[in-house]
Amino acid sequence: MRSGLFVIGAICALAGAAQGGLFFESEPNSTPPQADDLGSFSIGDTEIVLGEIEDGGGDDVPGDVDWYSLTLTEDTVLLAAVFCNDSDADGTMQLLSGDGSTIIAFDDDEGIGLMPSFQVPLSAGFYYIGISGYPDGVLNTVLNGFDDFNQAAFGHGEEFAYKLLIGLNVPTTGTTGALALAGMIALRRRR
């Protein structure tokens, strides 16, 4: 149920966005200090990021991790979801504070299929969002491209192209608000 509400919220965020953009991942962006900078965001802004995750290709080789940085200009709710056309793809996503090491949120399958999503209230400030392949990050480690169950030997084995949707504070007025409310009522009645 939670993922259904999130998807409705993410769609409404895009539909009612005051500002939106499209960003293409660039390498290297495998660590927070190398993160692609998405810029500053205010309430109502959205961004769609197109990226690709590669597997490690062998023992002792980490799989790909894509890190993005963003600055929130005001307190808000951050909505983030990863979408992928490959139904077998299994991604993970992390949100870090500006220090690049404090994990604020992590998910590996709350989105559509085995893709991650989360909704997190945040204060104004600087943050990092990382995308990787499962099982990277499941043991509460910062995403590093390794299989968390045997980090010393194996990189994660996932390969997929993705779209990362970032939206701030779903609008609650006008048509978009009515659609969000109708969706929540419909989902609540199913319980």
Image: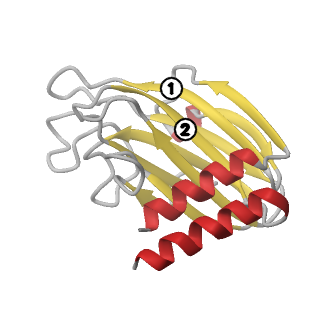
* Display coloring: secondary structure
Query: Is the residue 117 above or below the residue 70 in the image?
Result: below
Seen at 25% across and 47% down, the residue is 135
Specify which label sits upstream in the sequence, 1 or 2: 1
Quadrant location of the C terminus in the rendered image: bottom left
Label drawn at residue 51: 1
Q: Image quarter for residue 169?
A: bottom right
Tell me which amino acid carries mark 1.
Gly
Would you place residue 96 above or below residue 135 in this image? below
Q: In which quarter of the image is the N terminus?
A: bottom left
Q: Which residue is drawn at 72% across and 60% down?
A: 170
SS assignment at label 2: strand
Q: Which of 65 and 166 is in front in this view?
A: 166
- The answer to whether residue 127 of the structure is visible from this angle is no
Using residue 147 as the reference point, say whether residue 51 is left or right of it. Answer: right
Q: Is residue 141 left or right of residue 120?
A: left
Residue 179, percent across and down? 69, 60
Residue in view at x 59 percent, y 47 percent: 128
Instruction: Identify which amino acid the numbered label 2 is placed on.
Output: Leu
Q: Which of 115 and 142 is in front in this view?
A: 115
Q: Position of residue 117 (x, y in %)?
A: 47, 53
Give the residue at mark 2: 164
Q: For marks 1 and 2, give the CA distance.
A: 8 Å
Q: Can residue 113 be seen in this view?
A: yes
80 to the left or right of 63 = right
Marker count (numbered): 2
Contact (Cβ within 8 Å) of mark 1 with mark 2? yes
Q: Which of 64 and 186 is in front in this view?
A: 186
Residue 24's x, y, as percent?
61, 22
Horizontal and vertical percent for residue 94? 47, 52
Under circle 1, the secondary element is strand
